[in-house]
Each structure stands twice: as structure tokens, then as C-alpha cells.
Image: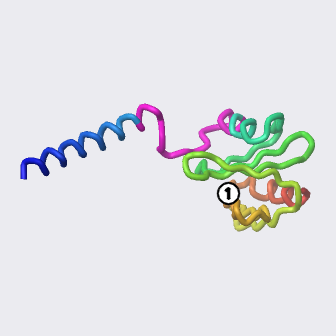
Amino acid sequence: MTGKLVQFGGSLIAIFALAWIALKLGLGGDARIRDEAHLRDLVDEALHGFDPVDIAIGRDGLSALARDGEGRIIVLRRHGSHFASRLLDRPARVERTAGTLTVDTGDRRFGEVALDLGTDAGVWAERLNAV
């Protein structure tokens, strides 16, 4: 009985130690796009040299759109604790419901992205349809 109690206590200490290390390393957590500067960093990581002139961040911070001076549009969405992106190099299917846009990039692995953009949804729907 004592051996099992020691084993349980050791396991519990190890779990707390790993949780503390993960916390100190900033692992996990709630990854969201914090602001315009953060979005610009994410876009640069995804596609170096893409310089956004227009951006839209979903109200929940889980997805965003950015357009450069050439009219190219990149869409970002949270994927686990990171962000995945796709450059829209062909027309995307866009559905607008009130202030929400649903963007289907045509890439099954990326899936659809829903962005709550409020009053900017109409402007971005037009931009996406023009790609």
C-alpha cells in the first residue's frame, strides 16, 4: 500500500512539474490574434514580403484577412495553438450572413473560415469575389 501511495505522489509531482514547465514556456493557452501588429507578424511569418494594406480581424480573434497592394488576399485561421494561412490565388466561395463571412478557399485540408467582421463584411465580400 505504501509503495502505491509513493508512486501516486511521485506521479502527481511529475504532472505538476510538467504543467509548470509548459506554463513558463508559454505552451498551449488561448491563441488569438491580439491586434493589427500581431496580425502583420503572422502574415509575414506565413508569406514573407506580403505587406498588408487592408486587414480585417474576426471579432473572436481566431481568424483574419489581409490584402496587399497588388490585390492579393491571405486568410488566416487558428489551428491548434498556431495559425494556418492560405493565399487566395483563385476565386473563393464567399457567403455573407449579416456581419459574418464564410470563406471557402477550395482547399479541403484548410476548410472553411467564418469571420465575424460586423459592418466590414460587405466590403470584404466584394474584395474576395474580385480575386
Query: Is residue 39 rendered magenta in the image?
Result: yes
Check the picture and name the quadrant holding the C terminus. Answer: bottom right
The image position of residue 83, as x and y in percent, is: 64, 47
Q: Residue at x 76, y 68 (%)?
A: 95
Q: Residue at x 61, y 43 (%)?
A: 33
**Which amino acid is tagged 1?**
Leu
Nearer-the-camera pick, 84 or 64: 84
Nearer-the-camera pick, 26 or 71: 26
Q: Residue at x 70, y 60 (%)?
A: 110
Q: Residue at x 31, y 37 (%)?
A: 17
The image position of residue 3, as x and y in percent, is: 11, 48
Taking the image as shown, residue 129 lies to the left or right of residue 109, namely: right
**Which residue is labeled 1 in the image?**
115
Taking the image as shown, residue 32 lies to the left or right of residue 53, namely: left
* Residue 99 seen from this side: no
The image position of residue 85, as x and y in percent, is: 72, 49
Nearer-the-camera pick, 108 or 29: 108
Taking the image as shown, residue 12 lies to the left or right of residue 124, namely: left
Magenta-drawn segment: 22-40
- Relative height, residue 64 to residue 99 (above, below): above
The image position of residue 44, as x and y in percent, is: 75, 36
Q: Residues within 10 Å of mark 1 (few under 14, many from 20)?
A: many
